[in-house]
Amino acid sequence: MILVNKYILSILTGNFASAITIWPFIFLRDKRSASDPILVNHEKIHLKQQLEMLLLFFYIIYALDYIRNRMNGMNSRVAYFNIRFEKEAYAYEKDLNYLSNRKAYHWWRL
């Protein structure tokens, strides 16, 4: 379910992101973003990742990846882009058929 709520994004990302996925919702900054197929596909990839990780484990690994990246000297932006879940989502966001062909736990191979 897609919801437009810039306040949720502001609270959860400090205005860093234009979208965030917290199963089962995709929160977007504005209505225009809902018509961006690449952005929506990126977030749908996160929905799939969250489900296969039973939600809680997704958030734990996501946070641990970010912390590990920061401890390895990456700035916050680089650390974010090097989170394994983000790597998969960015790598395949333009492939609008990706989710129908995606192998489970593909993020682990990146």
Image (tube, grey):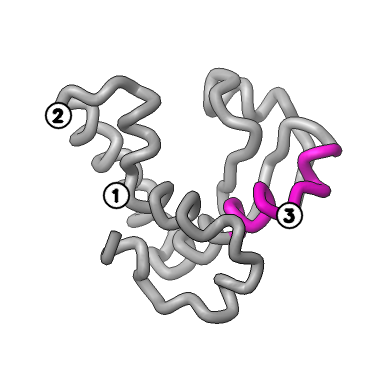
The residues tagged by marks 3 and 1 sit, at their Cα atoms, a distance apart of 27 Å
Query: Of helix, strand and loop, which one carries label 2?
Result: loop
Looking at the image, tell me whether mark 3 or mark 1 is earlier in sequence order.
3
Q: Residue under circle 3?
A: 37
Please state the extent of the stretch shown in magenta in the rendering.
Answer: 32-44
Q: Is residue 23 left or right of residue 86?
A: right
Residue drawn at point x = 45 percent, y = 62 percent: 49
The residues tagged by marks 1 and 2 sit, at their Cα atoms, a distance apart of 16 Å
Image quadrant of residue 41? bottom right
Residue drawn at point x = 42 percent, y = 47 percent: 86
What label sits on residue 61 in the rendered view?
1
Tell which tag, 1 or 2, sits nearer the viewer.
2
Q: Residue under circle 2?
A: 72
Looking at the image, tell me whether mark 2 or mark 3 is earlier in sequence order.
3
- Residue 63 is situated, as x and y percent measured from the top left of the image, at 32, 39
State yes or no: discs 3 and 1 in contact (Cβ < 8 Å): no
Query: Of helix, strand and loop, which one carries label 1?
Result: helix
Check residue 33 for magenta coloring.
yes
Type of residue at label 2? Answer: Asn
Check residue 11 for magenta coloring.
no
